[in-house]
Image (spheres, helix red, strand yellow):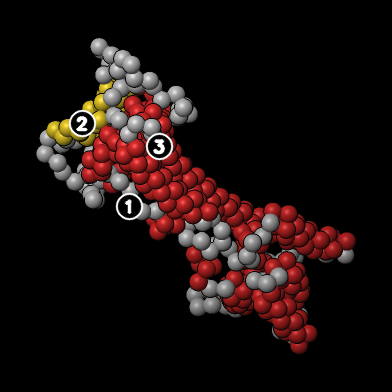
Amino acid sequence: MSATPSAPFLKKVNPGVWAALAWTAGLLFTALLRVRLPGQEEADVMVGVVFLRWDGLTMLAVATALALRGCLLLTRRPTAALWFLLSAAVVGSTPLGVTAIPFAQYLAVDVALYVIAAARPPREARRALLAALGVLVIHLAVRLLAGWSVGTTGALAVGLTAAVVWLLGRSEHQSRTYAERSRAQVAEQAVTAERLRIAREMHDTVAHTIGIVALQAGAARRVMDTQPEQVRQALTEIETASRETLAGLRRMLGALRTDGPGDPGPRAADEAALPEMPGLGALDRLAEVTASAGVSVAVHRVGAPRPLPPDIDLSAFRVVQESVTNVVRHSGADACTVTVDQRDPEALVVTVEDRGAVPGRDRNRAAGGSGHGLTGMRERVTLLHGDFTAGPRQGGGFRVTARLPLPTGVTTR
């Protein structure tokens, strides 16, 4: 993880610059406390004996050099930078004649603590806090052992401020970690949803084509000795359907494979690789192909046709396609009816129904179903907040009905 936290004020300016400004502000504040300002009878703090001597000024210069060195290292080596700044705080406090390290000398240390807490691993952040508090404790202990006066209250205030700054940094670190984890989860969910969508498309396409192919092959086998022309037509339909499905599968699988570094992602790759998805406008072609397999499909449109949102159009077509496929493969019926009802301005209703098995007509047992057809249709409709029903109809046969609400203010085909 980078040593630069994501706080807005630290994004625009390098953290080392903030630390340098904090140290400079601390020096300025320290000097102002020891000068009688306009309106004051005397300075707030008595000037220390060493403060204005050459050795005191030398120590302040050394402390400033240590602090600037720490500021330069703060982005690349934050822990080393913290030790430089702590050393600067101790050296800079010596000529001031104070009983504890003042808050002004710890401003730059506080900036470093925030940077480390916000951008570094938890263990390193905890060590940084212990180091900052430990220096304060050691400074007080040395003064006590030497028999000097000790500013315990001032040291406690400085330590409390450092702890609060550290907690703010950890809070920022946790917020950023949570945001990154959330973005990763959203991206992962988007990938999963896209792959499931492609899987549904693949299932619908393959199931329909295999049903037609199986039925055509069975019909060709029965008349291959007596009606060679019908056999030739059936084989042509099988070849056409197989080639179209194979081409679609190749494109879908190509989209599923685009998950490596630098790839546009499943959605972008899918949009680039897959052909335009069919809609209710393709029902006539669906009826033609199904009729060639021996099951006639009557398409009835009720209400004035109007443009539909792409997801509604595609889902409605897939529901019809899967339902017709089930009629071909499992019902034993020779005909079914597809009704597209657009009379309701707020919803689209599609219905597929058949009259049941025709006496003497065998059901296509060879192409046994996977059991996912009705589940897939229900999932499609539910995702669009619609209603789905499927079951036997009175008088025989089976009926599938899907009601898809039409959202307002969306882009249509």
Give the CA distance from mark 3 to mark 2. 21 Å
- Check the image and report above or below for 149 versus 301: below
**Depth check, front residue: 8 or 300:** 300
Numbered label attached to residue 276: 1
Outermost residue on the left side: it is 304
Name the residue tied to disc 3. 213
Give the CA distance from mark 1 to mark 3. 23 Å
Give neighbour class at mark 1: few <14, some 14-19, many 20+ (Cα, 10 Å): few
Mark before the other along the chain sequence, 3 or 2: 3
Please name the amino acid that badge 3 sits on. Val
Q: Is residue 226 left or right of residue 166?
A: left
Please name the amino acid that badge 2 sits on. Ala
Mark before the other along the chain sequence, 1 or 3: 3
Numbered label attached to residue 6: none
Instruction: Give x and y (percent) for residue 75.
Output: 64, 71
The reply to whether residue 329 is in sight is yes
Numbered label attached to residue 298: 2
Give neighbour class at mark 3: few <14, some 14-19, many 20+ (Cα, 10 Å): many
Instruction: Give x and y (percent) for residue 191.
Output: 49, 48
Residue at 25% x, 12% y: name it: 394
Residue at 64% x, 66% y: name it: 3
- Check the image and report above or below for 59 versus 384: below
Give neighbour class at mark 2: few <14, some 14-19, many 20+ (Cα, 10 Å): some
Mark before the other along the chain sequence, 1 or 2: 1
**Label 2: element kind:** strand
Q: Is residue 16 left or right of residue 53?
A: left
Q: Is residue 350 left or right of residue 377?
A: left
